[in-house]
Image: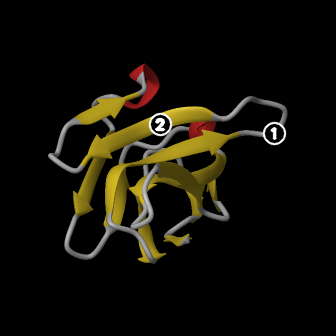
């Protein structure tokens, strides 16, 4: 019902910045929470940040002060601005959205992932 398309990943030097974008499309009543998760090789997927429709945010301790999440409800997009990147931020980043369907119920949807590599 919902498709999430991510963009903005790439290779950046330590201390650099990247901006990840995720756009949701398809058939849904509304999106409650949108967020970003990441998964490094051999590691479990972890929450990076999420944001509610009302603008409430939550960040992993490891990214607080460096990353900022925002959203445009009208465009059904979520942005993750990543500053002061560190090598340990290297991972595949996945967009996530919890959407309420017209037929009822809410479901989690995932993007295909975008690679972020922080290396000199």
Q: Give 13 or 81, whichever is nearer the viewer.
A: 81
Q: Give 90 or 94, whichever is nearer the viewer.
A: 94
| Crowd band around label 1 with a 10 angstrom C-alpha radius: few (<14), some (14–19), many (20+) | few
Q: Which residue ends up furthest to the top in the rendered image?
A: 61
84 versus 72 height, above or below: above
Report which residue position mark 2 lands on.
48
**Residue 10, disc:** none
Question: Picture coordinates of residue 86 (x, y %)?
Answer: 52, 38
Q: Horizontal placement of 107 versus 76: left or right?
A: right
- How far apart marks 2 and 1 lie (CA) works out to 16 Å
Report which residue position mark 1 lands on.
41
Q: Which residue ends up furthest to the front in the rendered image?
A: 103
In this rendering, does residue 39 appear at all? yes
In this rendering, does residue 120 appear at all? no
In the picture, residue 72 is in which quadrant? bottom left
Q: Give 92 or 35, whichever is nearer the viewer.
A: 35
Considering the numbered disc 2 on the image, is that residue within a helix, a strand or a loop? strand
In what quadrant of the picture does the N terminus appear? bottom right
């Amino acid at each position: 019902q919902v498709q999430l398309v991510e963009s903005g990943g790439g290779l950046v030097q330590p201390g650099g910045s990247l901006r990840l974008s995720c756009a949701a499309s398809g058939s849904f009543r509304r999106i409650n929470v949108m967020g970003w998760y990441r998964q490094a090789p051999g590691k479990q997927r972890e929450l990076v940040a999420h944001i509610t429709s009302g603008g409430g945010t939550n960040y992993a301790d490891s990214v607080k002060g460096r990353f900022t999440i925002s959203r445009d409800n009208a465009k059904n997009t979520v942005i993750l601005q990543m500053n002061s990147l560190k090598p340990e931020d290297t991972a595949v980043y996945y967009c996530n959205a919890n959407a309420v369907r017209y037929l009822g119920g809410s479901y989690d949807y995932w993007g295909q992932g975008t690679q972020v590599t922080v290396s000199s």
